């Protein structure tokens, strides 16, 4: 009976995998056409909020392009826009809104990452930061961490001309995550059914494949740890004090449909997620705190113990090779 169930699980996962790829292609192309036709939306900051995800197509797009929701950042996107030589980001507004932020430039319509800019790696004394790009069409995504009370998305210049002015958003804009699980339905469950299965079989699959299917496009300085979690299985995470001191440790637990159920910033050396009444998977994002952006500590994580009742992880630090 167990073998039959296992084979059935793999078959459903394969069907889910194909369904996800087909829907990602269809929905992505529909959204591309929508942006090309709707020039007004393309030239405005689109910041994730309850209003944003209530708009047609937005939630299906997010559930196919970036389904591992980043519950700890405020996220805004802009574009597509045509560039001949450069774009420039208003650093004053970005730095006043967040102590740590990441801007990612994507190609359009392929959505390949072209380059990324981290606030800790650029000269914050300058009012603008310019990025040179080959002639083409691009979109821009900006994620704010460690944000302040007053949040505004920066003005952007394209080829030296103002493309969009700064855009203020309320500081509770991420409250929509509290009710996002209510959007769960058969469609989203079918899209992401396979993720739990490939995480469970990750020892038998190429790690690059599992990582590509599960992880978001993260900044180079971010360390990820992730795995499936069985129903009624306790998750224990031990974090070295050095990591707690120098890094922000962001935890999110997702339902099998990839909608977030719970999240927090881990600030103690031991974190315990009590047994849940459903299967799911978790994701740890470990990022240097702004004041430790030049840390020589490299984050490592390992699974220490796993059985039917508990899953035990350790997050530690080692010196970066010189």
Image: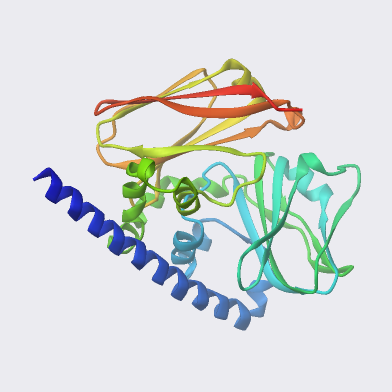
- Residue lying furthest bottom: 37
Q: Residue at x 46, y 54 (%)?
A: 213
For residue 166, say whether it is visible. Answer: yes
Residue 165 versus residue 97 in the image, above or below = below
Place of residue 123 in the rendered image (x, y in percent of width and height, measured from the top left): 87, 43
In depth, the one of 51 and 156 nearer the eye is 156
Residue 94 versus residue 224 in the image, above or below = below
Which quadrant does the N terminus fall into? top left
Q: Is residue 148 left or right of residue 267?
A: right
Place residue 157 in its image quadrant.
bottom right
In depth, the one of 155 and 200 nearer the eye is 200
Q: Is residue 309 left or right of residue 215?
A: left
Q: How is the image coloured?
A: rainbow
Q: Is residue 64 left or right of residue 232?
A: right
Q: Residue at x 56, y 41 (%)?
A: 72
Place of residue 132 in the rendered image (x, y in percent of width and height, measured from the top left): 84, 62
For residue 190, say whether it is visible. Answer: no
Place of residue 211 in the rendered image (x, y in percent of width and height, measured from the top left): 49, 48
- Count of marks, rendered view: 0
Which quadrant does the C terminus fall into? top right
In depth, the one of 302 and 19 nearer the eye is 302
């Amino acid at each position: 009976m167990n073998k039959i169930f296992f084979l059935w699980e793999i078959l459903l996962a394969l069907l889910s995998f194909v369904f996800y790829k087909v829907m990602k292609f269809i929905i992505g192309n529909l959204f591309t056409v929508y942006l090309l036709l709707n020039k007004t939306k393309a030239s405005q900051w689109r910041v994730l909020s309850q209003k944003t995800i209530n708009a047609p197509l937005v939630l299906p797009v997010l559930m196919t392009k970036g389904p591992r929701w980043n519950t700890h950042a405020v996220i805004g996107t802009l574009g597509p826009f045509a560039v001949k030589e450069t774009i420039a980001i208003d650093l004053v507004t970005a730095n006043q809104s967040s102590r740590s932020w990441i801007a990612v430039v994507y190609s359009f319509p392929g959505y390949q990452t072209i380059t990324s800019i981290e606030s800790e790696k650029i000269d914050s004394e300058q009012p603008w930061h310019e990025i040179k790009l080959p002639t083409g069409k691009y979109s821009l995504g900006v994620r704010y961490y460690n944000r302040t009370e007053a949040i505004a998305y920066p003005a952007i210049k394209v080829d030296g001309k103002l493309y969009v002015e700064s855009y203020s958003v309320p500081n509770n804009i991420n409250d929509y995550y509290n009710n996002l699980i209510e959007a769960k339905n058969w469609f989203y469950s079918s899209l992401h059914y396979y993720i739990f299965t490939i995480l469970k079989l990750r020892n038998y699959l190429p790690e690059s494949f599992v990582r590509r299917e599960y992880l978001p496009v993260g900044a180079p300085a971010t360390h990820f740890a992730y795995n499936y979690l069985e129903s009624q299985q306790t998750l224990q995470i031990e974090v070295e004090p050095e990591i707690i001191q120098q890094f922000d440790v962001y935890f999110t637990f997702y339902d099998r449909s990839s909608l977030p159920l719970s999240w927090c910033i881990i600030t103690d050396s031991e974190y315990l997620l009590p047994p849940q009444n459903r299967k799911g998977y978790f994701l740890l994002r470990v990022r240097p705190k702004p004041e430790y952006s030049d840390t020589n500590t490299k984050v490592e994580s390992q699974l220490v113990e796993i059985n039917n009742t508990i899953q035990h992880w350790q997050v530690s630090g080692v010196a970066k090779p010189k």
